[in-house]
Amino acid sequence: MPDQSPLSPELATRLKRDADGLVAAVVQQHDTGEVLMLGWMDDEALHRTLTEGRVTFWSRSREEYWRKGDTSGHVQHVRSVALDCDGDALLVRVDQVGAACHTGQRTCFFTDLEAVSR
């Protein structure tokens, strides 16, 4: 991850990153409100997301950037990005093409805990 932020100073100072320099990014389908997934972004991933029109994350397991859909074809086209009031989470509204989850599901949030806890 880069040491110097590619973001504007105003945005960079508003972000509250975790110890690894990351901010949680909740991804939501722009027209239905369906919550699709959660990913992590550092300043560079957020910059790429804001400037390229496709969602880019920082992969904590692989320690590299990945742009959603480059290998799967399940692309996320950015419609808007918002920062929460505390500066520690992003809401990325997208037009999702195909499944958002690596399991092939439309959303990563398909496990109903009430059903599991019975």
Image (cartoon, rainbow, N blue to C red):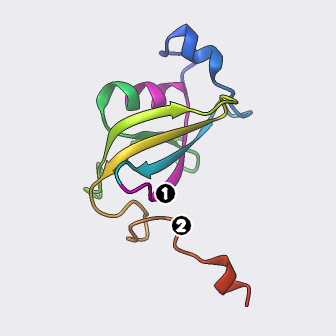
Q: Is residue 106 magenta-colored?
A: no
Of the pair 69 and 71, the residue shown nearer to us = 69
Q: How many marks?
A: 2
Q: Looking at the picture, which amino acid does disc 1 mark? A: Val
Residue 70 point in image, percent of width and height: 29, 48
Residue visible at 54% across and 21% down?
2
17 or 20: which is nearer to us?
17
Mark 1 Cα-neighbour bin, 10 Å: few <14, some 14–19, many ≥20: some
Q: Is residue 43 magenta?
A: yes
Label 1 residue SS = strand
Whether residue 52 is situated above or below residue 27 in the rendered picture: above
Tell me the residue that label 1 is attached to. 35
Q: Residue at x 70, y 30 (%)?
A: 86
In the rendered view, tell whether residue 106 sits above or below residue 9: below
- Dots 1, 2 in contact, CB < 8 A: yes
Residue 50 image-quadrant placement: top left
Which residue shows up at 69% across the image and 27% down it? 16
Q: Which of marks 1 and 2 is nearer the N terminus?
A: 1
Indicate whether 26 appears above or below 99.
above
Q: Mark 2 points at which residue?
A: 109
Depth order, front residue of 62/4:
4
**Residue 91 coordinates in the image, percent (x, y):** 51, 40
* Mark 1–mark 2 distance (CA, rounded to whole Å): 7 Å
Q: Quadrant of the N terminus?
A: top right
Point out the image quarter for the C terminus.
bottom right
The stretch of residues the image draws in magenta is 32-48
| Crowding near the residue tagged with mark 2, few <14, some 14–19, many ≥20 C-alpha atoms within 10 Å | some
List the single residue furthest toward the bottom: 118
Residue at left 38%, top 67%?
A: 106
Residue 45 showing in the rendered view: yes
Residue type for callout 2? Phe
